[in-house]
Image: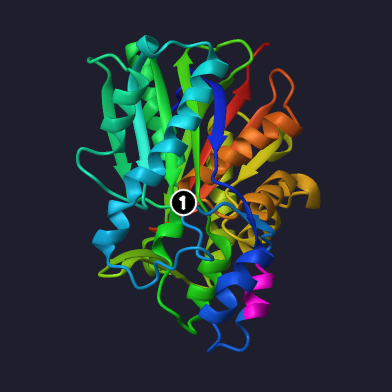
């Protein structure tokens, strides 16, 4: 479905204090994974140099905590990040809270009722008639269907929307293990909040949301899992994820572009969720991209880690900061998650 009537006006993110990958290994994970002699090699080859844990494992080991204990920490840790990103994006947009007709909150790392959406609406001072939607447990790709939802709302209602993704994987450090997928997950994931404002029309300086495309390979549904256990949420990552993505990324992107009269060569910038180095390499091969095409995604993986749903918006924020796209240029956003699901969004840079 072509959106066309909504634009991303501003993007902002917020993260906890940084810890280097070395500090996290030396201060916690070297002991945590001591039963696997090869764990350090996997950990250090993940492509991550720095992460931002709200719950720092070198200070506080939550690996034996119950799920209830972890979720009691969710709102206290999530709210400062959520408010930081939301307040900044509203300031960058020049929007008042009374301008917001929809607040869409995305998270798969914690739950509370009343939830983060209610607490954020209260603390930001959103109007009482603002609509709220909470999108939970979709995983790393959730920002893109949420962006499609927000854009459809804005186009039909002619009111602005605030979309916020906030994730706290640091709450879900698991018990010591020699499982490859657990070691890799604990080397990759980190915490962040990212927010965008979506406004009606082709706002000058914004990014018009042109169209979306989704593809789900149901035969690979078990390749990415996020299981609720008695001791937190447990990540499952199959080593076959990159090869499944490589098979589907090309057809997904080509369907999106051809429907809008475009070819891959006409895309000015590519924003791919950095689910890991293997994922980014698979996307590069599948789309036959130059080696430098996903440099911003690799930078975010290196400096932020995989922040689940927030990550693709952090990459888009860094793209606008480091390599802004000229007026009329097209951007393709790509994200991947449980299902196994691929999502693509086509953006076009508006006149500044």
Query: Could you say where residue 72 lies in the image, as x and y percent from the top left?
Result: 28, 52
Locate residue 44: give its quadrant: bottom right
Q: Is residue 151 visible?
A: no
Q: Position of residue 160 (x, y in %)?
A: 40, 15
Please tell me how crowded label 1 is: few (under 14), some (14-19), or many (20+) other residues with Cα within 10 Å.
many
Is residue 43 within the magenta segment? Answer: yes
Is residue 222 at least partly visible in the picture?
A: yes
In this image, 221 relative to 183: left or right?
A: left
Quick one: which residue is furthest to the front in this view? Answer: 59
| Left or right of 30 on screen, residue 124 | left
Q: In the displayed structure, does residue 261 sit left or right of residue 126? A: right
> In this orientation, which residue lies closer to the viewer: 255 or 313?
313
* Circle 1: element type: loop
Q: Position of residue 259 (x, y in %)?
A: 53, 32
Colouring chosen for the image of the structure: rainbow
Q: Is residue 57 left or right of residue 74?
A: right
Residue 230 drawn at (x, y percent)? 25, 70
Depth check, front residue: 15 or 248: 15
Q: Residue at x 74, y 37 (%)?
A: 265
| Quarter of the figure that contains the C terminus | top right
Main secondary structure type of the part rendered in magenta: helix
Which residue bears the numbered disc 1? 140
Position above or below: 246 against 111: below
Residue in the image at 69% along x and 19% along y: 328
Does 294 appear above or below 7? Answer: below
The image shows a total of numbered marks equal to 1
Which residue is depicted at the point 63% across and 76% down?
42
Q: Is residue 283 magenta?
A: no
Q: Is residue 279 above or below residue 296?
A: below
Q: Is residue 195 above or below residue 34?
A: above
Q: Quadrant of the N terminus?
A: top left
Please report the bounds of the magenta region as a residue range: 40-46
């Amino acid at each position: 479905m072509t959106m066309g009537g909504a634009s991303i006006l501003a993007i902002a993110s917020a993260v906890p204090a940084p810890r280097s990958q070395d500090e996290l290994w030396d201060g916690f994970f070297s002991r945590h994974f001591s039963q696997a002699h090869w764990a350090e090699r996997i950990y250090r080859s993940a492509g991550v140099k720095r992460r931002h844990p709200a719950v720092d494992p070198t200070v506080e080991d939550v690996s034996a905590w119950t799920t209830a204990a972890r979720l009691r920490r969710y709102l206290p840790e999530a709210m400062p990040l959520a408010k930081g990103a939301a307040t900044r994006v509203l300031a960058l947009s020049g929007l008042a809270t009374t301008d917001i007709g929809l607040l869409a909150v995305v998270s798969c790392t914690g739950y509370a009722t009343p939830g983060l959406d209610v607490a954020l609406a209260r603390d930001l001072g959103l109007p009482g008639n603002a609509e709220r939607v909470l999108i939970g447990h979709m995983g790393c790709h959730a920002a893109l269907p949420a962006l499609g939802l927000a854009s459809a709302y804005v186009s039909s209602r002619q009111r602005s929307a605030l979309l916020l993704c906030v994730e706290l994987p640091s709450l879900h450090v698991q018990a010591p293990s020699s499982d490859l997928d657990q070691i890799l997950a604990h080397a990759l994931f980190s915490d962040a909040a990212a927010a965008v404002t979506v406004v009606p029309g082709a706002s000058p300086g914004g990014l018009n949301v042109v169209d979306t495309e989704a593809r789900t390979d149901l035969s690979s549904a078990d390749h990415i899992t996020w299981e609720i256990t008695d001791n937190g949420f447990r990540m499952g990552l199959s080593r076959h994820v990159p090869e499944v993505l490589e098979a589907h990324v090309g057809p997904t992107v080509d369907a999106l572009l051809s429907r809008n009269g475009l070819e891959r060569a006409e895309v000015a910038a590519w924003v791919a969720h950095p689910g890991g180095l293997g994922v980014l390499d698979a996307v590069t091969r599948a789309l036959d991209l130059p080696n430098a095409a996903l440099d911003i995604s690799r930078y975010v993986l290196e400096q932020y880690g995989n922040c689940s749903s927030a990550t693709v918006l952090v990459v888009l924020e860094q793209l606008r900061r480091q390599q802004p796209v000229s007026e009329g240029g097209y951007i393709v956003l790509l994200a991947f998650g449980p299902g196994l699901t691929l999502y693509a969004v086509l953006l076009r840079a508006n006149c500044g």
